[in-house]
Amino acid sequence: MSDDSTRFQHGLDKLSDALRCYQQAHCGATPRDLIHQVDKVRLYRYRPLPDREPSGRPPLLVVYALINRPWILDLQEDRSMIRRLQEEGEDVYLVDWGYPDADDHALSMEDYVCRYIDSCVDVVRTCSERDSLNLLGVCQGGTLAVCYAALNPQKVNALVCMVTPVDFKTPDSLLSNWVQHIDVDAVVQVMGNIPGSYIHTVFQGLKPLTNSVRKYIDLVYQSADGDSQYLLDNFILMERWLSDTPDQPATFFCQFIRWLYQQNRLIKGELELGDTLVSLQNLRMPVLNITANHDHIVPESSSVALAPLMPHSEYMHHRVRAGHIGIFVGRHSLRKTPEVIALWLDARIDRARSFPV
């Protein structure tokens, strides 16, 4: 038997032993409190770490995508973007969109940006007694955060975008190329809300070999050389997160696909929410744009297209050596990215004013 076959068999044996005594790993490691709720949308504040002094920075509100659940940002105690941000002194809040159902089919982009995000922003501003806060938008949530900041620049001290699509028609966007000719009206007429299982299948199909075979082979080889129990916990948690895909409200889904992916209205300056034009020229706050150089879902070209559209703002681009998911859970990114965010925000404390007494 070759060395490679021996190593593979050793990995299988270790994984088998780990599976026999496996107990379901807990997700969402960092304590938090529910402080606000509108419909199914919840706003959480993470409890401060007992051994950390307040940084003096404005609070950081995280806006995640509707596609998956935000607990990827708090996967495990030692693999938590949220906890690492806290360790850097951030006062972290999180918008949780919940699980839309049939009652939510008519929710629109305007509802999510102008009603839900705005409500959460105002609660955080009140809790912190600040005129403005720092906003961290992730993936699709980053697009929503960009729209919100453009419509409400006075409430956003600084904007951090992480793997955020802005130009939805770059040639290297697999997802964009795939959805260009979909009749979204016909899809929702048949399906109503878009089932999460359908969305999950689409994303898995963007890298079919990796998602169907390669990841299992990699797990076996990694187990041969490492802690199989820890690796198994990580693997199963990731699989649970990948399949934890909420249904998409029909109206929101139609608008997001048609207006952004098919018509590219945001970058063209043609997107209107609540009868107001979303002009990226209004992004006068500092912007930190974080991209992943191996991102197959939001290619860097889609994110960096933001820079030339906001000439009046201070702009910085930070590239992470990671893929779309690795930027949240990879050890290199977890070690460096929260530090980059905190140092960048540190230099912008003075922009945020306190409420007058």
Image (spheres, grey):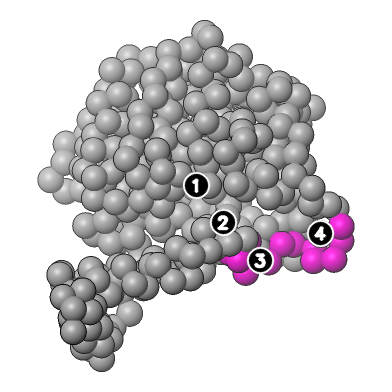
Q: Which residue is mark 4?
A: 188
Q: Amino acid at mark 2?
A: Leu
User: Few, some or many C-alpha atoms within 10 Å of disc 3 (few <14, some 14-19, many ≥20)?
Assistant: few
Q: Looking at the image, is mark 3 or mark 4 nearer the viewer? A: 3
* Residue positioned most to the top: 312
User: Few, some or many C-alpha atoms within 10 Å of disc 2 (few <14, some 14-19, many ≥20)?
Assistant: some
Q: Is residue 260 above or below residue 153?
A: below
Distance CA(mark 2)–CA(mark 4): 22 Å
Distance CA(mark 2)–CA(mark 3): 13 Å
Q: Which residue is mark 2?
A: 206
Instruction: Please report whichever mark, 2 or 1, sits nearer to the chain's N-terminal start.
Output: 2
Q: Which residue is mark 3?
A: 198
Q: What is the secondary structure assignment of the residue under circle 3? A: helix
Instruction: Please report whichever mark, 2 or 3, sits nearer to the chain's N-terminal start.
Output: 3
- Residue 60 visible to an observer of this rendering: yes
Q: Amino acid at mark 4?
A: Val
Instruction: Please report whichever mark, 2 or 4, sits nearer to the chain's N-terminal start.
Output: 4
Name the foreground residue: 55 vs 233.
Answer: 233
- The residue segment tinted magenta is 186-201
Distance CA(mark 1)–CA(mark 3): 19 Å
Q: Looking at the image, is mark 1 or mark 3 nearer the viewer? A: 1
Q: What is the secondary structure assignment of the residue under circle 4? A: helix
Distance CA(mark 3)–CA(mark 4): 12 Å
- Residue 41 visible to an observer of this rendering: no
Q: Is residue 230 left or right of residue 243?
A: left
Q: Which residue is mark 1?
A: 296
